[in-house]
Amino acid sequence: MTVDLGPVWLTLRLAGITVALLLLIGTPLAWWLAHTRTRVKPLIEALTALPLVLPPTVIGFYLLVLFAPAGVLGEPWLRLTGQTLTFSFSGLVLASMIYSLPFVVQPLQGAFEAVGRGPLEAAATLGAGRLDAFFTVASPLALRGYVTACVLGFAHTLGEFGVVLMVGGNIPGRTRVISIAIYEQVETLNYDQAHVLAGGLLVFSFAVLVLVYALNRRFPVHAA
Amino acid sequence: MTVDLGPVWLTLRLAGITVALLLLIGTPLAWWLAHTRTRVKPLIEALTALPLVLPPTVIGFYLLVLFAPAGVLGEPWLRLTGQTLTFSFSGLVLASMIYSLPFVVQPLQGAFEAVGRGPLEAAATLGAGRLDAFFTVASPLALRGYVTACVLGFAHTLGEFGVVLMVGGNIPGRTRVISIAIYEQVETLNYDQAHVLAGGLLVFSFAVLVLVYALNRRFPVHAA
Amino acid sequence: MSALAFDLSVDHGAFAMRACETLPLAGITAVMGASGSGKSTLLRALAGLEPAARGRVQLGGTLLQDAAGVRLPPHRRGIGYVFQDARLFAHRGVAGNLRYALHRARPGADAPGFDEVVAALDLAPLLGRRVGGLSGGERQRVAIARALLANPRLLLLDEPLAALDLKRKAELLPYIRHLPGRFGIPLIYVSHAVEEVAQLADEVLILTAGRVVARGEVHAVLEQPQAEAVSGHFEAGVLLHAHVLGQAPDYALTEVEVSGQRLWLPHIDDAPGAPVRLRVRARDVAIALQRVEGVSIRNQLQATVLRIDAEPASAYAELLLALDGADDSGPHLRARITREAVATLGLMVGQPVWALIKGVSFDRRVLVGGQSG
Amino acid sequence: MSALAFDLSVDHGAFAMRACETLPLAGITAVMGASGSGKSTLLRALAGLEPAARGRVQLGGTLLQDAAGVRLPPHRRGIGYVFQDARLFAHRGVAGNLRYALHRARPGADAPGFDEVVAALDLAPLLGRRVGGLSGGERQRVAIARALLANPRLLLLDEPLAALDLKRKAELLPYIRHLPGRFGIPLIYVSHAVEEVAQLADEVLILTAGRVVARGEVHAVLEQPQAEAVSGHFEAGVLLHAHVLGQAPDYALTEVEVSGQRLWLPHIDDAPGAPVRLRVRARDVAIALQRVEGVSIRNQLQATVLRIDAEPASAYAELLLALDGADDSGPHLRARITREAVATLGLMVGQPVWALIKGVSFDRRVLVGGQSG
Amino acid sequence: DEVVAAVAANFAAAMARIEPAFEQASGHQLTVVLGSSGKLVTQIQQGAPFDVLLSADVERPDVLEKSGLGVPASRFTYAIGRLALWSPDPQAIGDDGVAYLRAGTFRHLAIGNPAVAPYGAAAQQVLEKLGLWAGMQDKVVRGEDIGQVYSMVASGAAEAGFVALSAVIAGPKPGSHWTVPQEMYPPLKQDAILVTRARANPAAQAFLAYLKTPASRDVIQSLGYDLPAP
Ligand SMILES: Nc1ncnc2c1ncn2[C@@H]1O[C@H](COP(=O)(O)OP(=O)(O)OP(=O)(O)O)[C@@H](O)[C@H]1O
Ligand SMILES: Nc1ncnc2c1ncn2[C@@H]1O[C@H](COP(=O)(O)OP(=O)(O)OP(=O)(O)O)[C@@H](O)[C@H]1O
Ligand code: MOO
Ligand SMILES: [Mg+2]
Ligand SMILES: [Mg+2]
């Protein structure tokens, strides 16, 4: 019994890139949400959580419409890059990002709120500019929030399925991720293969998670 | 065009019961994780996050095997209740709980860690027992964590699909929740119906989320 | 009131505490010691908040914890705590914080009442406030009130007045002083301020690097060099036990007697015969060769020089004086004068002198209600 | 050194602050006031940390904020801050906290060096520690060191010594006192302790309910009733400007001159002619009708009674005295004696008297280096 | 009596019309559970309360039969699917679908996942027969079932796709299509089987019998399926 490792690498790449980009986008968004006093904050927060609510295949369907070459997002993308957003790795990344956004933003926002203004004020009076204070004080103090965000975001992208299937089109080597591969084995009643893939994914994920959480213990908790 | 509201009520009931039970189970678990000093903590944390990693249909598959009348969980359940766990509402609740566990436990754990020991020690010296202090100090201080846990847990159960489909079997009135109903409309090419259902779900969820987040603003943030 | 007996050790790696004492808890026990000497650690261990604390604690008839595994949880110890940081509940307003304690108060007929405590700590204007915007001192007052309202068997206060201004401090001190008498709540009180301690405490316990280096009646301990290490030389002095003789209402003065000699103090409302405690600082005592007339210093006591400790590096010498009419052990005075004065006056051990105590250096604040001492 | 000019208002609903001052910043400016009077709020507004603060702040030549919308962010103001709660960074150890400041220090040849600051605050034993287990006083010392290492243009200290024991306080005070001279860093210093303020400050500013009710040279302000409201009557007194005359090395005494009269103080290391500042508390001054011989009180000054304020409810009266040889505005003394003594000695306004100042009540601690005053 | 029918998704449109007719004719209660054939079989293996399975292929009912979960004698072919190349653009596909395929002006062509969906396997065979399969790998996208393939095309993400003819007929967008000649792929026989647990369920038997009635056969044929000779 040989196992095709292609989907595994693809999945790891997808999850890695998705989480990296989400951290990049999610950090300022979460920061803003944690510190803003605007009235529209609840609206933005609700919007951020919305991807959770719809079934993945349904999100997949709507994203397909948005990403299609004539779609609101797909059309400019096609013009700019010459490539379609649907059925491409880029599209998959974008879809995963939309789908996993709440898992990154919510823990980060919570962590930033818990850090509060005190340490930032202290840093400012020591001459640290806003970015400096963010990187050297706020984010290390919010490290546990980052760990949670990474774990949830990464894991959710690993396990994501409906959206990826729909938007990605299951193209081997390009958009065929491991969840689809497992699904296929179950559907065709190849349970042995499915067990191997699922078991491998499980063991790998478990090991990564244990490692992350074990490291996490070393970070101080910043209680009130 | 008439819309069958059965799945909507069923879904709300499922999500409500799931979240309620998860809070009940997740609270002591999160509390324990936040305060324990045991070495196995990272293992338990990793286990808690594991349901995120596997694709829903795959989890569904394994739960199906576990829940089956001859399965490890299904067999005793059948003996005790006289009913099968698979393709029943109870089975759906259990499956949803397993699937949504991380969304409830992680925010709660984070919130409890942020509260820290200080306020609990203060409460104890005022004569508050452990349970008393938990309900009157720790949980109100962790209110934002509870809000996040409820929102993520509820929304995730609403949008859950693969697991429910596999374990529940799409039986009208019993296990056919709204996500499956929408999926089915898409599958059977009834796009109009699907748009109505999805739109309704979206608007309803958005309204609930905005409300929750707006209320959330009134709770104090407990910064370090 | 009951005794508190403990034999505790705490190991924090770089810092280790070991303390074994029996405190009478007959009022207020002060804990003094340099920063980092383990004062907070001791209090936490007594309250059951320090997981690393090993050993035995017994409060009155109740065994709170022992080496064999008994360990009463903090909320069952009936020990109140005012933390160095106030630790107010952020989800409740000021009034909510107070009511939290009130609802969980130990039952007791003479438990402190809400209005009474609010009035004593002047919290009425703050009752409607959230705790978020309170100033440092405001927070601490709320924390003290909260702890009182729980009506504990023993109240631990960890530098509760450090954040308060002197005026507020002066207002609160008498109230704290009377807590043991009024509500039957003994206090253990961490403080750096020897004045506060002299004014409040019956017993003092001094910690250095996790060990009790001195302990006993305020009187005795504050005269020891360990006390000076903590309180600074400037404030060194003695405590005198005295008895009320009578009143001079026109001048708001009270006459007291120490070993047969007479002193005038600002009025205190006690009947003749009542015992009072006086603190006399060494720096407030001057020496004269004869009784001095025509000066505002009314209190001049006859004494004999017992010892002269010159401090070669400084301008000062410290004299130990025996009050005439006292026995060997009995009330001593200290005087801190310049070495130059010692030389010019030709002071020698055994010499009879007059100790001039500037009347006003008996402040109402250094009078300690004698009822418990 | 430069001046700090501000015209600020802060509205917190129940509390409103309005302050418009120009401080010379020629050393140390103390801010005093009751708990909740707005001291922390003022400091936060100056540092740019108070979003609700409106108005204008100018530090030397730099406009930090104005009503028209200029608003320099806190990190560009070059203003250091030692917070009432220490606010150490929990993710860095003690050394890490210090280095954080060092790496961001304003450039400057005479910026405080790491080893120097560590030594001054005795932090060497704590350098390897995490900040979690530090005691209250330890935290505050680290916070002060950290603020110093950032080499600010102006350093704000919000009750930095409240958590320290007297000995540590006494060790730190001289260091703080010399910061302005040594590193060119002027300080604004919040404190409740009038002794600290007298010892440290050049200027004082007193806040009551968000308003500046008194401001000026320490000298002048501490004599005002507003100062008493904050510091408590017990510590009331005056500051005297004096000049060194000479030394008596055998007795470790220094002779100084005030308005032509002579006083002996514990040795200070200043050349003849150097100006010094002395604090004389009212309660340390006794009155005699003639010069008194044969007593240890060496410092007896000729003075004239200017005013007698009897306090009918208490045992005391307060006398205001003009030192002979001074002009009308010139150095005054206060004496606090019993009303009974006033009556017995027959004291009256205009009467010449001798003020007896107990030599030892000039403590090294109340000497302020005159170089910046 | 009640019968629960597990029905392959591609047959959903037909079932929508058959269900009321059957209930009226027989007086039995029919509950339809839609899903992919593979999932439905898995669920039956785990004890799902399904009485009959209408699969999209012949292999899966065979698996049931061999494992004793299906009643052997009950098995029959209830429909033969027809494959269609479809585009929502009415102009896109002319009479000659082969020409459209060869021209290759589309960016993406959606087919069912050959590993999972019989229609997908058929589509692959058609493309192989035309010699286009190898050259079209970067254009072919795979949906898990025929419903997904339809969605991919209907949304405009893929210009055309191989779907069930029944979907073109029942679907919301007629567009243009080319019915693939039957000789280009093996017949897409769809078998039904009685699940063992329902051996004695009269409603289940009645339903299977009803599928063979002319009324039912007319409906099935009207939706583009072929039928074996009765
Ligand atoms: N959890 C801990 N881990 C390591 N060291 C600790 C811990 N808790 C306290 N310490 C150390 O124990 C010593 C005593 O601390 P403690 O808080 O009892 O001091 P303290 O006497 O209350 O001082 P302060 O007057 O400054 O509050 C300090 O040096 C402190 O750093
Ligand atoms: N954000 C805020 N919202 C409402 N009130 C506030 C806020 N910040 C401060 N206050 C109030 O303003 C007043 C002044 O507070 P501030 O902290 O400046 O006092 P302080 O003089 O520093 O007192 P302390 O000596 O006790 O520290 C207090 O009554 C406080 O409750
Ligand atoms: O309905 Mo199917 O079995 O996926 O073609
Ligand atoms: Mg302490
Ligand atoms: Mg303050």
Image: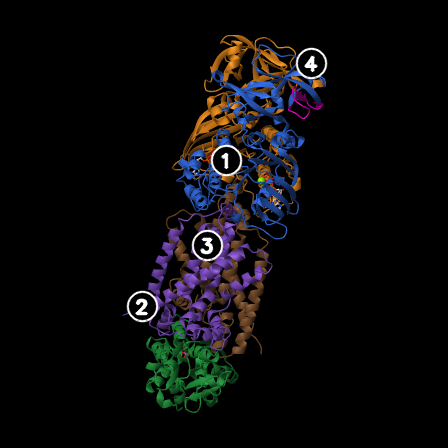
Chain colours: A purple, B brown, C orange, D blue, E green
Could you tell me how far apart the alpha carbons at marks 4 and 3 are, in whole angstroms?
76 Å
Which label sits in the foreground, 4 or 3? 4
Residues tagged by mark 2 and mark 4 found on one chain of the structure: no
Q: Are marks 1 and 2 in contact (CB under 8 Å)?
A: no
Could you tell me how far apart the alpha carbons at marks 1 and 3 are, in whole angstroms?
41 Å
Could you tell me how far apart the alpha carbons at marks 1 and 2 are, in whole angstroms?
67 Å
What element does badge 2 sit on?
loop
Name the chain letter of the residue that bears numbered label 2: A
Q: Residues within 10 Å of mark 1 (few under 14, many from 20)?
A: some
Residues tagged by mark 1 and mark 2 found on one chain of the structure: no
Q: Are marks 1 and 3 in contact (CB under 8 Å)?
A: no
Could you tell me how far apart the alpha carbons at marks 1 and 4 are, in whole angstroms?
47 Å
Q: Amino acid at mark 4?
A: Leu
Q: Which mark is residue A5?
A: 2
In the image, residue E71 above or below residue A28: below
Which circle's residue, 1 or 4, is located before the other in the chain? 1
Which circle's residue, 3 or 2, is located before the other in the chain? 2
Q: Is residue C247 visible?
A: no
Q: Which residue is mark 3?
A: A145
| Image position, residue C284 (x, y; %) | 57, 19
Residue drawn at x 58%, y 52% as measured from the top left: B219
What element does badge 4 sit on?
helix
Q: Are marks 4 and 3 in contact (CB under 8 Å)?
A: no
Magenta residue span: D309-332
